[in-house]
Amino acid sequence: MFNRKSEPKSLQPAQAALETYSKLEDAIRARVGELDPLIAERLSAERALRDAETEEALGEAKSGSVSAAKKRVDAGVAALDRQADKLHGLRARQAKLVPELIQGHQSLTEELPIHNSAIGEEFKIEWRKGMAEHSRLLSKRRAVEELCGMLELPGPTITSCQLDAELTAPRETLAGIGGAIKKLARAGKAASDAEGDPAPVPGVTVYTYHADKTYELVRPSQGLEVGAIVVEATFDPGRLASLVRAAWARPTRDRSVSQALWAAQRAATKMVEPPTEADRQRKAEEDEILKRRREEDIRNHPEWNWDDSMARPNPNEMSAAEYEAYKSMPLPEFRQWQKAHAPTGAAAPGSNRKVSAGPTAEFAAGRAEIERVIDKA
């Protein structure tokens, strides 16, 4: 049995400080959870006030609707302020534990080697007793096997062992106090400067932080998912300000308005302007020119094999060099020229597939040339 005289003297005070810290941490977590319905009520009240003021501007407001909406907003803000005061008190109480936690950590760090050494010495005694019994059994086995022959007996095996809590308590308490001190240190750093800010999001608007506003997370933080609505009291002091500076949080918006605007944007991108009469006329002229040129080639060169590979290419899909060659040589020769000058990965000659990913200077040159031909026709 472990001798409790070797237990660190500072263990019980350190455990008491850590237990108080853990209780405060649980209370803070519970109070933060209570913020969600209060935030939702405040946002609803602010939305109702905006609607009432809009109706008033349009001359549609009912008597007293704006003042009633303002009272609701004031009540929502006051409820959040009261909850924030409760959280501030809990966090302030945690901060006051810092001297006790530091003292406990230092004392346990000094006393833990002595405690572990005592455990090792006691186990040595237990081990010697076990080895003596093991030696006795081995000797007896040897004598029995000389009498009866070899015996099939299992050997020793190593299994898992759970040490008593009193043996591991000092080490676990030291680790718990170390984690508490680090968490409080991070909170203090966030409150004092911006060096601990998360990595900023490139290309995203950074808003000015206001402690009395509500914000929406655009990156997960401290267990909260993207889209969570938060206030200053949700985090340790200074944490939300650092999230806003890094564009990990943005001011809350009226979701109904945002969704309507996004729907309008999506609808606008899908809108296709119907072709005008001039567009249809131009397209018909282009098709007629290409048709006449193909008929002329067929008439002048009946010996050619007019399969799909000999189909007249579309000048709109040609580069400037291709278009010049196309104008100056018969179609079969142009196809051979295309094969000789086709870049790696280009579409096969005669294919209707575009090689270019989008409009280019060559495309524009080819388009201008065909428009010039149309104008002369």
Image (cartoon, rainbow, N blue to C red):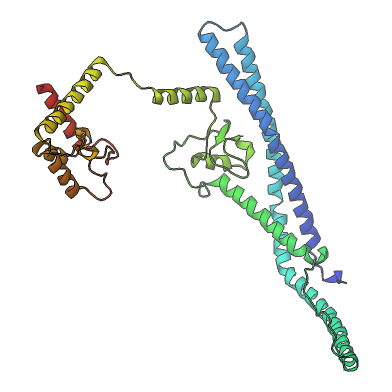
Is 254 situated left or right of 316 in this image? right
Q: In x, y percent, where is residue 308?
A: 24, 37
Q: Residue at x 47, y 44 (%)?
A: 200
Query: Number of callouts in the render?
Result: 0
Quarter-wise, where is residue 7 in the image?
bottom right
Q: In x, y percent, where is residue 105?
A: 70, 61
Residue 244 in view of the camera: yes
Q: In x, y percent, where is residue 281?
A: 21, 18
Q: Is residue 361 above or below residue 23?
A: above
Q: Which residue is drawn at 56% across and 34% down?
A: 216
Q: Residue furthest front?
A: 303
Question: Camera-side residue: 86 or 220?
Answer: 220
Quarter-wise, where is residue 292 in the image?
top left
Quarter of the picture holding the N terminus = bottom right
Q: In this view, does 113 lie above or below 211?
A: below
Question: Camera-side residue: 189 or 116?
Answer: 116
Q: In this view, does 290 lie above or below 1?
A: above
Q: Residue at x 62, y 17 (%)?
A: 70
Quarter-wise, where is residue 4 in the image?
bottom right
Q: Which residue is drawn at 56% across and 33% down?
A: 215
Q: In x, y percent, where is residue 374?
A: 14, 24
Q: Is residue 348 above or below residue 16?
A: above
Residue 238 in view of the camera: no
Quarter of the picture holding the C terminus = top left
Question: Camera-side residue: 368 or 210?
Answer: 368
